[in-house]
Image (spheres, rainbow, N blue to C red):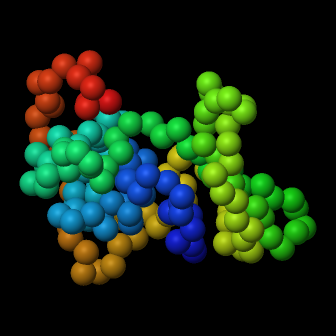
Amino acid sequence: SPNILDFTAPESAGRLNPNTAPWQVLTSLPGVTLDIARLFMARPDLQPIYAAWVDRTIGTRYDTLPSPLQTFPSDQIRVTQRLKGLPWVVRYNVHLTPTGMFGPWKITYSIRMESSTVDRAPTSSARGPVRPLDSQPSNAPASVDAPEKFPPRPSQSASSPFLL
């Protein structure tokens, strides 16, 4: 089962990227139901999510500064180093600094973890292995055909700075 450390980074900007967050994390946002999380999960395949779209979809005010959402690609990656047979792994948070004075990256933190918390088959998705949307509790809302429920596409120019 997923560990909370799979979804968090203790040293970061403290923002959530709805383009890459798993549905369990998306439903922790105020106003995001399971149906809306499904909509969020399908949308990046068509067009990236940005804060103004979230505001129009669920009636929030995330398109303000400072926003709790980060809708542009991150400059941080998470690397898990494991060696077969060892009961632990080391997870690193790597901050990419291509023009940095001391190198093209810096490790902002590392943590040693039990192997069982991260020893899973690699996936091709950045969202990682999480409980599928179809395996929801019996009291969960009915399924949604997300593509038919999308709001109209925005009319703003894609070159606007906050639409990345």
Give percent across and percent down for residue 91.
70, 59
Extreme-front residue of the structure: 101
Give percent across and percent down for residue 37.
28, 57
Give percent across and percent down for residue 73.
45, 36
- Left or right of 135? Residue 30 is left
- Left or right of 6? Residue 150 is left
Residue 70, image quadrant: top left
Q: Nearer the viewer, residue 42 or 16?
A: 16
Q: Is residue 120 visible?
A: yes
Can you say whether 2 is above or below 154 in the image? below
- Left or right of 89? Residue 129 is left
Q: Quadrant of the N terminus?
A: bottom right
- Left or right of 22? Residue 164 is left
Residue 85, image quadrant: bottom right
Can you say whether 151 is above or below 59 in the image? above
Q: Nearer the viewer, residue 46 or 109?
A: 109
Give percent across and percent down for residue 25.
38, 63
Q: Is residue 44 visible?
A: no
Q: Residue at x 19, y 44 (%)?
A: 63
Q: Residue at x 38, y 48 (%)?
A: 17
Q: Residue at x 80, y 58 (%)?
A: 82
Residue 148, image quadrant: top left
